Amino acid sequence: MANRILIIDDDERLTEMLASYMATRGFAVEQRADARSGLTALGAGDFDAVVLDVMLPDLDGFEVCRRIRASSDVPVLMLTARGDATDRVVGLELGADDYLPKPFDPRELLARLGAVLRRTRRGVAEPTAPLRFGRLTIDRQSREVQVDGQRRELTGRQFDLLVLLAERAGRVLTREQIMTALGAEGWDNVDRSIDVHVSRIRNAVEDDPKRPVFVRTVRGVGYVFSPAQDAKSARKLPPG
């Protein structure tokens, strides 16, 4: 079955080109030129991913992303013509899974979408036992994270990053290793993409995000998941 992609972008020339190109690669694409019709289509359809422009005629893409995340964990790849690093950070903080500045090569867009969809299928097709670290439970089958039995919201990419670190608990991963493992080679290694995702994960699962117990920074190297299980354990660790 073809993957269904919703493109929300008012640049009709671009969306027609993308839809035609993606159709030859086995994708089923629907296009909407404004935020409200895009949100309506998403609510009525079963889409595998959304390609979302920042600049829309009625609502900006950031607000659209916020509304999508209020009710759905569908992967969102944001586009912008402004090319501002701040935009990338804002988009990621609002729950976007990836960010691509215009102009871009359609092959790169397709590669990024493919990476997201492969991770989603892998999470469904290969159920495994939940990872448990004291109060924290990471269910790779349902793709849910709970702290003390309460569900915490993460985007698809943030969940994948948390699983990547948790499955390698105690092992320091560099940013380059993280980008490679997540199929995110297109990220700029000097921007804050990974740091933003880590910050969002900490806000979701840590009691005190400024003194994280689980996802810790190894300065000048990368990140490590610590299987510390409670605040008492955390007090033995320096701020991370």
Image: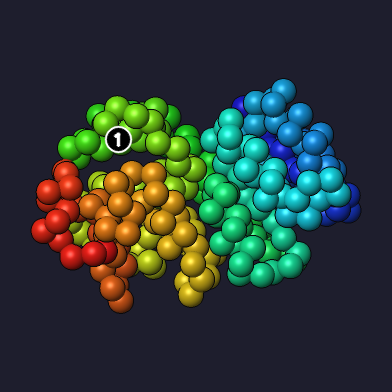
Is 174 in front, or is 200?
200
Say how many tags the image has: 1
For the question of whether residue 51 can be seen, the reply is no
Expressed as whole percent of the image width and height from the top left, the position of residue 61 reads: 72, 49
Judging by the rendered image, the residue that carries numbered circle 1 is 147
Expressed as whole percent of the image width and height from the top left, the position of residue 111 reads: 58, 54
Name the secondary structure under disc 1. strand
Image quarter of the N terminus: top right
Expressed as whole percent of the image width and height from the top left, the position of residue 69 reads: 58, 38
For the question of whether residue 91 can be seen, the reply is yes
Q: Quadrant of residue 139?
A: top left
- Identify residue type, mark 1: Val
Image quarter of the C terminus: bottom left
Colour logic: rainbow
Q: Quadrant of residue 224?
A: bottom left
The answer to whether 130 is drawn above or below residue 19 in the figure is above
Residue at horizontal 17 percent and vertical 37 percent from the top? 134
> Left of 27 or right of it: where is 147?
left
> Left of 168 or right of it: where is 104?
right
How busy is the neighbourhood of tag 1: few (under 14 within 10 Å), some, or many (20 plus)?
A: some
Expressed as whole percent of the image width and height from the top left, the position of residue 226 reads: 20, 53
Query: For the view shown, which residue lies furthest in the top direction?
Result: 44
Residue at horizontal 58 percent and vertical 34 percent from the top? 70
Residue at horizontal 25 percent and vertical 38 percent from the top? 136
> Left of 99 or right of it: where is 57?
right
Is 104 in front, or is 208?
208
Residue at horizontal 66 percent and vertical 70 percent from the top? 84
